[in-house]
């Protein structure tokens, strides 16, 4: 039996990946579970393991090459077997046009058919046995929608019935082939269904930002400038695509408020001077994350996102935290923040931020946020507005905590003030509800002991 | 130009002339020529030993015919309408369809049961069509021609076929006319059972019909081309068991949309089974749900006005295609 090792899909929005390096040479014997290659996705580097034992017969994709999810990248076969079938060329779509990265024959260890992700962020390279029944792992977004993140489900896409994008089978196939996100395609078919021609239109640069051609990055800004366009990093491409998609499809509105930070700064100082080595050093951001977690619980209209054709409300407070890294930014997600103690939340925030800067985040830590927080206060930015990440319903842009004159009981006095701007997807909720949520968030920050309970 | 009725009669006559083993049996098929005058005049030419008048006893007609077929003849039994075929279901399903299998191939049952679908103020018990019932039985072949040429070619193939064939004509097609090709003696005169035919080429939607609904589909295709600029490919299924799936699948892979046009009831109708198979073979090619046009799930009304509401028409096909696009 010959197995095709395919480019795995790490997260539902991953459409392609590239090989960093092969760790095994052609002709070498591999055991199931051996790390055989390192691949680069838009978000992180991941080791992939051999799913089957045998001989690595053929490496189909060389380091540095970018291939779509589901495409064969290597072939593993039984030692005695000659590989007769010709594998697909590196730049051609996989057989049948459908990426099959998610096909996983059931095994003892993996009865549910989910890809076997280890804690080290490894994923088993999945064999493509044409005769085996296919099952589909649960994508992160489906887990959010169903709340069954731990439950293996045989066919994930049909699970999230309520939040599923309505598209014809042919449209789905074309979207896979063209690397188009169905969420970003405008439907013209009956009952709001995306038809194949809608996908084609999107791929020609209609309402969707196609994954394979990031908007506005291919052309040099000055046509007279002889310099070559920058060779974009995968992260740059992802940011370009996602932000263009967001800005052109999500109707943002912005709410700005000033927060008096004196009490919060005093409480933070007190906590950090307790001298308890077990406690983390609390940051202002920790308080904001905590306050946001509580706000999402108190104001469910904010804990929601536009998914497919409608609004999905979430139960947990999952908050993405924008972290600047050398050639872009990443936004690791703190899940279920409302249930964490303040100290645990702070530990996790620091851990995620530290690993974000060193590229050590696991793929599953990079998706599933319901809202996001972006803090540029450390750069002296007083206030700004941020762009909502597709799949989330809002984003909070946090400015610098500044000493300003404030009026207290009719008297002018020095005070600490922070300006924050909440951007909300108007499809999800409206101004008044957003303002109520923002007012609560502000109240929490101005009464920071409430963040500790 | 030859009428559908004349085409069936011509095929019976020519095959009776060609092969002495072919005999006809049925109710009123001698003097009156059968309820739709298909066999008119054959008694005069072939006499009562080959054109046999029977009592009004459908189980008996088919039972005799099964026995005659096992004994070496090639009987063509006429059942006045498919409604009366219900009385002969046991002989058709439990005898004709089974004997070749039950006795290790010692016998074949080269029988043709000719019967008629249709409606037209005939009331609830005489306006039905049951092709889906027959098509669900292994061991039977089911043929439903729409044109005079197909009626002739398929009837010849049915009589020569070694297995039992349910050959369902349509009362509203008997007077329709069409060309039946003149063939030289060495040309193939039969149309193989199990072959569908693309009767109109198109690229937006595939319409599959058979018998009267094929003509409705063709009319709908005209209207859609003229008024909506929608190009319909129309396929005449011609045989319901075995179905020529490759022809339908090939078309759906080009048009990505499919409408199935039948005249039997929607629930459990033949189209439901066809739909199931096509969606299985073409799932990733479909750009919309497979649609069906079928008889309403109501016993037929006698009233002409109510009947119009129940019966599937070309207008309904047009409407369904417009909804898809």
Image (tube, coloured by chain):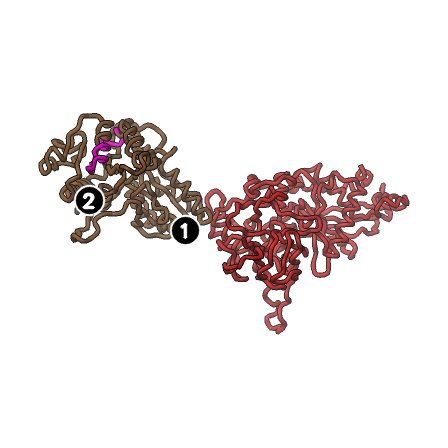
Chain colours: A red, B brown
Q: Quadrant of residue B241?
A: top left
- Name the side, left or right, on which B297 lies relative to B67: right
Q: Is residue A122 within the magenta segment?
A: no
The reply to whether residue B162 is visible in this rendering is: yes
For label 2, the residue is B177
Mark 1 element type: helix
The correct choice, above or below, for B49 with respect to A423 in the image is above
Distance CA(mark 2)–CA(mark 1):
33 Å
Marks 2, 1 in one chain: yes
> Which residues, given as a range, are shown in magenta?
B65-84
The reply to whether residue B311 is visible in this rendering is: no
For label 1, the residue is B253
Q: Residue at x 79, y 55 (%)?
A: A378
Front residue (pair A420, A246):
A246
Mark 2 element type: strand
Q: Residues within 10 Å of mark 2 (few under 14, many from 20)?
A: some
Badge 2 sits on which subunit?
A: B
Badge 1 sits on which subunit?
A: B
Residue A150 % position (x, y) = 65, 40
């Amino acid at each position: 039996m010959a197995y095709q090792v395919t480019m795995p899909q790490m997260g539902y929005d991953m459409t392609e990946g590239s090989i960093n390096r092969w760790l095994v040479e052609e002709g070498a014997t591999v055991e199931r579970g051996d790390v055989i290659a390192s691949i680069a996705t838009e978000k992180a580097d991941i080791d992939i393991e051999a799913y089957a034992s045998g001989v690595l017969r053929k490496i189909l994709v060389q380091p540095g090459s970018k291939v779509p999810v589901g495409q064969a990248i290597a072939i593993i076969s039984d030692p005695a077997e000659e590989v007769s079938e010709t594998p697909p060329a590196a730049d051609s779509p996989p057989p049948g046009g459908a990426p099959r990265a998610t096909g996983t024959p059931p095994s003892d260890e993996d009865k549910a058919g989910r890809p076997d992700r280890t804690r080290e962020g490894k994923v088993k390279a999945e064999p493509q046995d044409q005769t085996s029944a296919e099952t589909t792992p649960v994508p992160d977004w489906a887990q959010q929608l169903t709340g069954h993140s731990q439950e293996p489900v045989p066919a994930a896409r049909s699970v999230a019935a309520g939040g599923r994008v309505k598209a014809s089978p042919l449209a789905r196939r074309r979207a896979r082939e063209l690397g188009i996100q169905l969420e970003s395609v405008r439907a013209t078919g009956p009952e709001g269904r995306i038809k194949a021609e809608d996908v084609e239109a999107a791929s020609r640069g209609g309402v969707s930002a196609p994954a394979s051609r990031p908007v506005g990055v291919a052309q040099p800004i000055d046509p007279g400038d002889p310099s070559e366009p920058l060779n974009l990093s995968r992260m740059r491409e992802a940011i370009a695509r996602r932000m263009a998609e967001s800005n052109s499809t999500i109707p943002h509105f912005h709410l700005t408020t000033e927060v008096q930070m004196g009490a919060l700064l005093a409480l933070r100082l007190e906590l950090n001077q307790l001298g308890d080595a077990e406690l983390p050093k609390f940051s202002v951001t920790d308080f904001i994350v905590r306050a946001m977690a509580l706000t999402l619980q108190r104001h469910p209209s904010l804990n929601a996102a536009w998914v497919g054709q409608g609004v999905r409300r979430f139960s947990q407070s999952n908050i993405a935290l924008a972290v600047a890294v050398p050639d872009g930014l990443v936004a690791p997600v703190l899940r279920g923040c409302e249930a964490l103690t303040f100290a645990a939340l702070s530990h996790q925030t620091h851990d995620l931020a530290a690993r974000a800067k060193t590229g050590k985040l696991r793929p599953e830590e990079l998706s599933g946020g319901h809202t996001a927080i972006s803090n540029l206060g450390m750069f002296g930015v007083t206030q700004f507005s941020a762009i909502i990440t597709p799949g989330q319903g809002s984003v909070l842009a946090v400015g610098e905590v500044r000493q300003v004159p404030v009026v207290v009981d009719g008297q002018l006095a020095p005070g600490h003030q922070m300006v924050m701007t909440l951007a909300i997807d108007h499809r999800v909720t409206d101004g008044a509800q957003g303002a109520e949520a923002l007012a609560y968030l502000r109240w929490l920050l101005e009464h920071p002991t409430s963040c500790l309970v | 130009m030859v009428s559908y009725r004349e085409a069936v009669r011509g095929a019976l006559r020519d095959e009776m002339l060609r092969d002495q083993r072919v005999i006809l049996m049925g109710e009123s098929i001698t003097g009156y020529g059968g309820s739709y005058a298909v066999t008119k005049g054959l008694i005069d030419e072939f006499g009562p030993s080959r054109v046999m008048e029977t009592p009004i006893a459908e189980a008996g007609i088919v039972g005799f015919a099964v026995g005659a077929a096992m004994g070496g003849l090639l009987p063509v039994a006429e059942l006045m309408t498919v409604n009366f075929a219900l009385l002969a279901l046991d002989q058709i399903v439990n005898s004709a369809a089974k004997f070749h299998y039950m006795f290790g191939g010692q016998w074949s049952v080269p029988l043709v049961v000719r019967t008629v679908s249709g409606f037209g103020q005939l009331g609830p018990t005489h306006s039905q069509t049951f092709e889906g019932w027959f098509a669900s039985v292994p061991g039977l072949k089911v043929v439903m021609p729409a044109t005079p040429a197909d009626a002739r070619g398929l009837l010849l193939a049915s009589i020569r076929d070694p297995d039992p064939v349910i050959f369902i004509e349509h009362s509203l097609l008997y007077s329709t006319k069409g060309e039946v090709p003149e063939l030289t003696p060495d040309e193939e005169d039969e149309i193989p059972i199990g072959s569908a035919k693309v009767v109109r080429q198109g690229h937006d939607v595939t319409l599959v019909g058979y018998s009267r609904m094929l003509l409705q589909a063709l009319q709908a295709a005209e209207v859609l081309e003229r008024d909506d600029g929608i190009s319909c490919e129309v396929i005449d299924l011609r045989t319901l068991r075995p179905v020529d799936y490759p022809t339908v699948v090939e078309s759906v892979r080009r048009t990505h949309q499919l409408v199935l046009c039948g005249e039997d009831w929607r629930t459990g109708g033949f189209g439901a089974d066809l739909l199931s198979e096509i969606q299985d073979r073409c799932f990733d090619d479909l750009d919309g749900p497979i649609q069906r046009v079928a008889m309403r799930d109501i016993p037929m009304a006698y009233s002409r006005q109510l009947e119009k509401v129940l019966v599937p028409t070309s207008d309904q096909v047009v409407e369904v295609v417009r909804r898809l696009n």
